[in-house]
Amino acid sequence: MENGEVVKEYRIALGANPKGHKQEEGDNRTPEGDYTLDYVINDSAFYRSVHISYPDAIDRLEAHRRGVAPGGAIKIHGLKNGETQSPQFIQSFDWTNGCIAITNEEMDEFIKLVKMGTLITIEW
């Protein structure tokens, strides 16, 4: 958003079990809440990534209270390197382990549009 106006919207793919806030490592959920876009990762298993500041202190405390690991390494990223299916097909269902996926072209645009340190709200 810029000056209260939406600048760009993307069709996204979420964790394979997307409804509800991420509870623990391996639950295939995308975290919900307020986080920060930390930094760009150009060398990963996916075409470019932006790290999201999950887990925050509240997520860690809640996971500790329940005796589980909160998980981490949550990112906004492009498609998996070497993916041969069309981006339109890949974006037609939720398939990540908890990350937010967009197409490679959209990822390039996203990195140009968004400054690191930007606060984001993830909600269903």
Image (tube, helix red, strand yellow):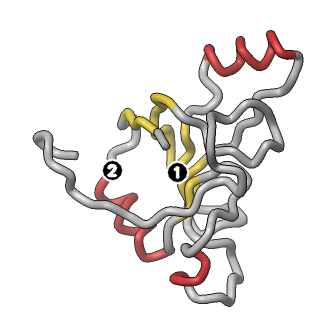
Q: Is residue 71 left or right of residue 14?
A: right
Residue 57 versus residue 87 in the image, above or below: above
Residue 112 is drawn in which quadrant? bottom left
**Residue at image point 50% right, 74% down:** 104
Alpha-carbon span between mark 1 and mark 2: 10 Å
How many residues crowd mark 2 within 10 Å: few (<14), some (14–19), many (20+)? few
How many labels were placed on the picture?
2
Q: In this view, which residue lies farthest toward the front?
A: 19
Q: For the point 54% across and 35% down, which residue is it?
A: 32
Look at label 1 and name its amino acid: Val
Extreme left residue here?
Answer: 3
Q: Is residue 28 left or right of residue 106?
A: right
**Mark on residue 114?**
2
Residue, disc 1 = 50
Quadrant of residue 25 within the rendered picture: top right
Tag 1 and tag 2, C-beta contact below 8 Å:
yes
> Residue sitting at 61 percent across and 32 percent down?
54
Label disc, if present, on residue 84 of the rendered structure: none
Q: Percent x, y for residue 16? A: 71, 57
Residue 120 falls in image quadrant: top left
Q: Residue at x 50, y 66 (%)?
A: 102
Q: Earlier in the sequence, mark 1 or mark 2?
A: 1
Q: Residue 69: percent from the left, percent from the top?
A: 83, 27
Could you tell me residue 2's position as x and y percent? 16, 45
Residue 110 or 122: which is nearer the viewer?
122
Q: Secondary structure at mark 1?
A: strand
- Classify 10 Å Cα crowding around label 1: few (below 14), some (14-19), many (20 and above): many
Q: Tag 2: residue type?
A: Val
Tell me where residue 9 appears, x and y as whole percent.
32, 61
Label 2 SS: loop
Does 69 sit left or right of 85 as displayed?
right
